[in-house]
Image: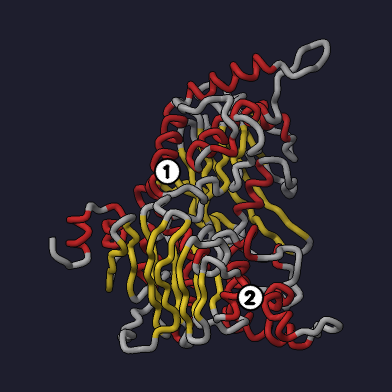
């Protein structure tokens, strides 16, 4: 008997059919992946399973052989064992672990309907014990690291499940986990499914899907083009071909020596945020990758050298300015020709409620607008030019950013900071949480930026991205400076990140 069986699921919005006769079957005790490009119908299908949307007439849904009334009523679904862990995990930092596990399902006294806190503490301790999670239930969630937070979210999802029953839907829930924490989280999921609980995992990370999932269903343009395919029969290229309907090739090697070109930005003596005495230089048209062990401090560098976070020391020299980074702010760095594309586009990069043209114009308003009249014509022309240049898929420049897919939102963020024509373009995790097609578009856009003469510093924990797009890669080693790799492969980047000093020297071709 299947844990989840959804048949003939369609969904139409107006004249647009976003899901077209999709079947999805998840077995007990399996990890089943759901993949597809943004706009393929994944989110709509998950929202139907959880009661946010009603499907078109003709659909059916069953859990453990029991038919579920459509549209799904969330309380009934929860009683039958469906729970969701969303991308942001949905945790409340100001509450304890125990309180977070109880949210939405606190036990109450019968007469006064007061929360039974002692019972809630026992429930939290029991579910954490079942998962073998070593977290004190009285700890404030805001003090936890990425992996324990994810474990608490899983514990909350399993709170009302009978051991070995139920279905957990992971909606991009592993997005924010560093690589070494991801390994621990995967081990936790394997313990969960070993008991018989099922997991439906929505993910853009094809390597993660292949490593973790038993089977995968692939959506393209609202249809299931691959239904319950064993992952043992696939590789990342074949899965990408199913998602896109075509084969995705690597970008062409850049093949140009840039060592003789002028330096557009040089950073010396940069300290703060866990790094010390960092020195980096980027040349005209060069793409320099920057990576390291998660948590080692390299993630702070893009914010320190762009004024987004105060440095304790450091000097930034560009073609037009010399800045003391201990006292410079974002405006100073922008005036010096430095732009930053931050990791969190939703929180730090974009005004989602504003139009594409408004977002792109923001860095230029003081320079091109007037206090009494901003002007719209130049904003529209600028947006149209960058929409065309970056192949942003949108109806008009007036389209709200929140209506775009993740990949197109990321391109708008690129456009926003390219609008001021920087000398140095700094990016942090530019392809995070975008599908395989958007990833390729974004990497091509980075190459296009460099080909226009801009220096690029690309900070990322993704070895495949760095190897594909960068002229050279700097691997941060705390207390030892940077290891420089040229013509790097993903394996060479990964080896250098986790290597001992001896093996790192070998990876770079240096003395051992």
Q: Residue furthest top?
A: 111
Position of residue 198 relative to residue 42, above or below, is above
SS of the residue at dot 1?
helix
Q: Give the quarter of the figure containing the C terminus.
A: bottom left
Q: Position of residue 466 (x, y in %)?
A: 38, 67
Of marks 1 and 2, which one's residue comes earlier in the chain?
A: 1
Q: CA distance from mark 1 to mark 2?
A: 33 Å
Q: Which residue is mark 2?
A: 416
Question: For the residue carrying disc 1, how many other residues have a C-alpha within 10 Å: few (<14), some (14-19), or many (20+)?
Answer: some
219 and 168: which one is in front?
168
Q: Which residue is mark 1?
A: 181
154 and 268: which one is in front?
268
Identify the residue shown where x is 63% and y is 80%. 387
Report the number of discs: 2
Identify the residue shown where x is 64% and y is 86%. 385
Q: Is residue 8 visible?
A: no
SS of the residue at dot 2?
helix
Q: Position of residue 220 (x, y in %)?
A: 55, 60
Would residue 111 be found to the left or right of residue 122 on screen?
right
Question: For the residue carrying disc 2, how many other residues have a C-alpha within 10 Å: few (<14), some (14-19), or many (20+)?
Answer: many
């Amino acid at each position: 008997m299947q844990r989840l069986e959804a048949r003939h699921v369609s969904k139409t919005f107006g004249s647009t059919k976003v899901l077209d006769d999709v079947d999805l079957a998840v077995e007990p005790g399996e990890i089943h992946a759901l993949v597809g490009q943004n706009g393929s119908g994944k989110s709509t299908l998950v929202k139907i399973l959880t009661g946010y949307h009603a499907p078109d007439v003709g659909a059916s849904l069953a859990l453990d052989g029991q038919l579920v009334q459509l549209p799904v009523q969330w309380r009934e679904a929860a009683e039958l064992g469906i729970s969701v862990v969303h991308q942001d995990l949905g945790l409340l930092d100001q509450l304890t672990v125990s309180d977070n596990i109880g949210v939405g399902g606190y036990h109450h006294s019968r007469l006064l309907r007061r929360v039974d806190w002692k019972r809630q503490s026992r429930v939290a301790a029991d579910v954490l014990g079942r998962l073998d999670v070593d977290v004190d239930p009285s700890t404030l969630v805001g003090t936890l690291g990425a992996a324990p937070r994810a474990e608490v979210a899983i514990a909350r999802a399993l709170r009302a499940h009978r051991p070995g029953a139920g279905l957990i839907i992971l909606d991009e829930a592993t997005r924010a986990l560093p690589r070494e924490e991801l390994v621990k989280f995967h081990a936790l999921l394997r313990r969960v499914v070993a008991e018989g609980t099922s997991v439906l995992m929505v993910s853009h990370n094809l390597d993660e899907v292949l490593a973790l999932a038993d089977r995968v269903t692939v959506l393209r343009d609202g249809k299931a083009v691959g239904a319950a395919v064993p992952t043992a029969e696939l590789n990342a290229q074949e899965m990408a071909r199913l998602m896109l309907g075509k084969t995705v090739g690597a970008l062409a090697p850049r093949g140009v020596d840039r060592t003789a070109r002028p330096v557009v930005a040089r950073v010396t003596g940069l300290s703060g945020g866990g790094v010390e005495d960092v020195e980096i230089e980027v040349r005209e048209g060069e793409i320099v990758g920057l990576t390291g062990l998660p948590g080692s401090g390299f993630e702070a560098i893009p914010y320190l050298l762009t004024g987004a976070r105060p440095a304790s020391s450091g000097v930034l020299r560009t073609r037009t300015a010399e800045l003391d980074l201990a006292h410079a702010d974002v405006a100073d760095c922008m005036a010096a020709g430095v732009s930053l594309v931050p990791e969190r586009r939703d929180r730090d990069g974009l005004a989602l409620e504003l139009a594409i043209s408004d977002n792109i114009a923001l860095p230029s308003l003081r320079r091109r607008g007037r206090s009494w009249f901003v002007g719209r014509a130049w904003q529209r022309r600028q947006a149209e030019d960058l929409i065309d240049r970056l192949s942003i898929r949108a109806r008009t420049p007036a389209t709200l950013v929140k209506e775009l897919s993740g990949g197109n939102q990321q391109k708008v963020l690129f456009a926003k900071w390219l609008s001021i024509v920087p000398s140095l373009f700094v990016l942090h995790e530019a392809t995070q949480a975008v599908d395989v097609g958007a990833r390729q578009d974004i990497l091509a856009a980075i190459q296009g930026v460099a080909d226009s003469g801009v220096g690029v510093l690309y900070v990322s924990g993704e070895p495949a991205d760095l190897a594909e797009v960068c002229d050279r890669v700097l691997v941060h080693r705390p207390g030892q400076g940077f290891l420089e790799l040229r013509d790097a492969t993903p394996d060479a980047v990964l080896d250098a990140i986790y290597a001992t000093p001896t093996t790192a020297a070998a990876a770079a071709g240096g003395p051992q």
